[in-house]
């Protein structure tokens, strides 16, 4: 995993994120992070049960009390906006009275907060506790889809003019950039082999640049993206038929992370699947939306459409029905695409 993020590079891409389409808008069209990207880069599950918040807060507080070996009445003093501090988790898990099962739950909760779901408060989201209660079924949840949902949401928040920070799984975003944009790639790690998570593939920076250097780098990245053409992109870094290896990547519907709902629309980025890009279908319309200047009120809530996810095999895009086909060359688009 990355010791230091390339903040200027990430910022340059955040500036091109459009939350209405959940994609980066580039001079040659749209690109986005897909479910097969998540699978290849992180190697965590993108199928099975959705991570949907349907557990009462009182139940979660009781689970937290058990995890931290305290009474439920003590929990409110540690609970802030659905999070507790990393220090609290670490200190309580080192106590002598916790069972190995509770220690394992606490470690997983800490790991989720530190890697897949980091937030701006540097706290640990306790709302993931219900999904850790049965350690034998942790793998049966779509953690990869939840990671992508949360990252989509955080990119939407960060794309607003007054936002100065971004949360979410930024190692996924940075590794995704390296896979698709060769001119931004660092060196490849010699010890990496095919089959390992691609996030481990890259030799990343060992120290943060000075602020002035970051500003200069951001300026350069902006110019590079402005001048970029489709022919320099690696459109299918994981093979020309990623939908065969990860069929759910062609799912067209709503993906979930606790109470967050985001549209997933692979028809907008068909070149990333080895298909001719045609004009995409209509956008999913949220039932509640606020993307105004007050960042704390940012909201884009869709109907959960949980039944679509549970039956995802029946909700895959059909390229032929859309008028597309396997591309003869990677950059192939329909004549009407950019109009």
Image: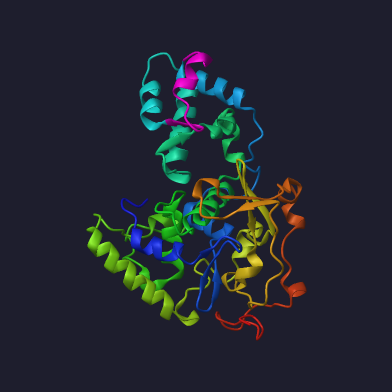
Q: On screen, 101 above or below 114?
A: above
The one of 37 and 117 positioned closer to us in this rendering: 117
Q: On screen, 129 above or below 197?
A: above
The one of 293 and 101 positioned closer to us in this rendering: 293
Q: On screen, 10 above or below 66?
A: below
Please state the horizontal and vertical placement of residue 231, each as a whole percent of the image: 48, 82
Does residue 14 appear to the left or right of 244 in the view shown? left
Q: On screen, 253 above or below 239?
A: above
Please state the horizontal and vertical placement of residue 4, each as a whole percent of the image: 31, 53
| Residue found at the very far bottom of the displayed protein | 335
Please state the horizontal and vertical placement of residue 299, each as a whole percent of the image: 59, 49
Q: Residue at x 58, y 27 (%)?
A: 133
The reply to whether residue 196 is in sight is no
The reply to whether residue 75 is in sight is yes
Does residue 77 appear to the left or right of 217 in the view shown? right
Q: Residue at x 63, y 59 (%)?
A: 249
Q: Residue at x 45, y 34 (%)?
A: 124
Image-quadrant location for residue 98: top left
Q: Is residue 76 magenta?
A: yes
The one of 314 and 207 positioned closer to us in this rendering: 207
Please state the horizontal and vertical placement of residue 314, each as a whole percent of the image: 77, 56
What range of the chain is rendered magenta? Answer: 70-84
């Amino acid at each position: 995993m990355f010791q230091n993020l390339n903040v200027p590079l990430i910022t340059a891409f955040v500036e091109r994120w459009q939350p209405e389409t959940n994609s980066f808008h580039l001079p040659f069209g749209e690109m986005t992070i897909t479910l097969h990207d998540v699978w290849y880069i992180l190697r965590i599950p993108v199928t099975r049960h959705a991570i949907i918040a349907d557990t009462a807060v009182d139940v979660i507080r009781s689970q937290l009390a058990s995890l931290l070996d305290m009474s439920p009445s003590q929990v409110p003093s540690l609970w802030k906006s659905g999070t507790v501090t990393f220090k609290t988790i670490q200190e309580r898990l080192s106590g002598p009275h916790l069972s190995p099962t509770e220690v394992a739950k606490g470690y997983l909760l800490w790991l989720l907060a530190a890697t897949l779901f980091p937030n701006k408060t540097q706290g640990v989201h306790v709302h993931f506790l219900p999904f850790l209660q049965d350690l034998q079924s942790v793998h049966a949840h779509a953690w990869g889809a939840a990671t992508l949902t949360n990252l989509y949401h955080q990119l939407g928040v960060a794309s607003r003019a007054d936002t100065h920070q971004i949360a979410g799984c930024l190692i996924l975003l940075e590794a995704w950039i390296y896979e698709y944009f060769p001119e931004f790639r660092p060196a490849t790690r010699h010890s990496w082999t095919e089959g390992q998570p691609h996030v481990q593939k890259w030799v990343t920076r060992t120290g943060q640049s000075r602020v002035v250097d970051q500003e200069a780098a951001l300026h350069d990245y902006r110019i590079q993206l402005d001048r970029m053409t489709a022919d320099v992109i690696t459109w299918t870094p994981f093979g020309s038929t990623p939908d065969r290896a990860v069929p759910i990547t062609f799912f067209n519907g709503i993906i979930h992370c606790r109470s967050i709902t985001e549209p997933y629309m692979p028809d907008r980025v068909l070149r990333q699947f080895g298909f001719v890009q045609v004009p995409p279908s209509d956008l999913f319309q949220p039932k509640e939306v606020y993307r105004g200047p007050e960042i704390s009120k940012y909201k884009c809530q869709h109907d959960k459409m949980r039944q679509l996810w549970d039956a995802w095999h029946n909700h895959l895009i059909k390229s032929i029905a859309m008028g597309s086909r396997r591309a003869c060359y990677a950059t192939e688009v329909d004549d009407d695409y950019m109009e």
